[in-house]
Amino acid sequence: MDRNLHLVDEILNSFGAVIGADLGGYRNHVCRVVSLCYSAGEFTDIEKEKIQIAGSFHDIGIWTAGTLDYLAPSADAARSYLLAHGKGDWAPEISEMIELHHRIHSCAHSRYNLVEPFRRADAADFSLGLVRMGLSKDS
């Protein structure tokens, strides 16, 4: 697992007060999802940055909105971050990565190539590897 995810640390540390005692556990989940996603293919540096941003925000609404109905608040938080960092044009793709990451069925039809590997990576981690989503045991 890639533990050198500075962007993940930067984003999550900015939410440290909101996430509180769950920060370490959430960071570990995000790092596993990002690493599993990376193992699903060859990605450019820009795609890896998008994966780290989506990973950092994909469940953040649990804490920022205080709800388990957190997909929309998580996507909203990511959009705000992207706009503040001059990357607003990434918002549709990263929002879709976040909003569809719990889908049971494939998102391979998406116009964005990162949606499906991100969905698979989260499912593999969330299921503790019971559902590997096509990822190897070595991932």
Image (cartoon, rainbow, N blue to C red):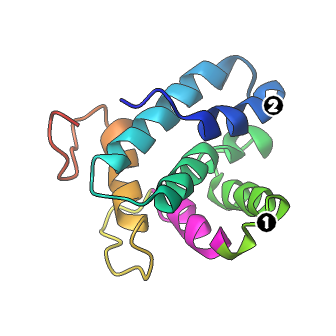
Residue at the front extreme, as displayed: 45
Q: How far apart are marks 1 and 2 (CA)?
A: 24 Å
Q: Where is residue 126 in the image (x, y as percent from the top left)?
A: 38, 38
Q: Which amino acid does label 1 sit on?
A: Gly
* The magenta stretch spans residue 120: no
Give left or right: position of 84 versus 94. Answer: right
Per the image, the residue denoted by label 2 is 18
- Quarter occupied by the N terminus: top left
Give left or right: position of 56 versus 97. Answer: right
Badge 1 marks a residue whose secondary structure is loop
Q: Give the range drawn in magenta.
A: 90-101
Q: What residue type is labelled 2?
A: Val
Tag 2 or tag 1, which sits nearer the N-term? 2
Mark 1 residue crowding within 10 angstroms, few (<14) / some (14–19) / many (20+):
few
Per the image, the residue denoted by label 1 is 86
Q: Position of residue 48 (x, y in %)?
A: 48, 53
Residue 10, quarter of picture: top right
The residue at the point 40 percent across, 62 percent down is 103
State if disc 2 and disc 1 touch (CB < 8 Å).
no
The answer to whether any part of residue 15 appears in the image is no
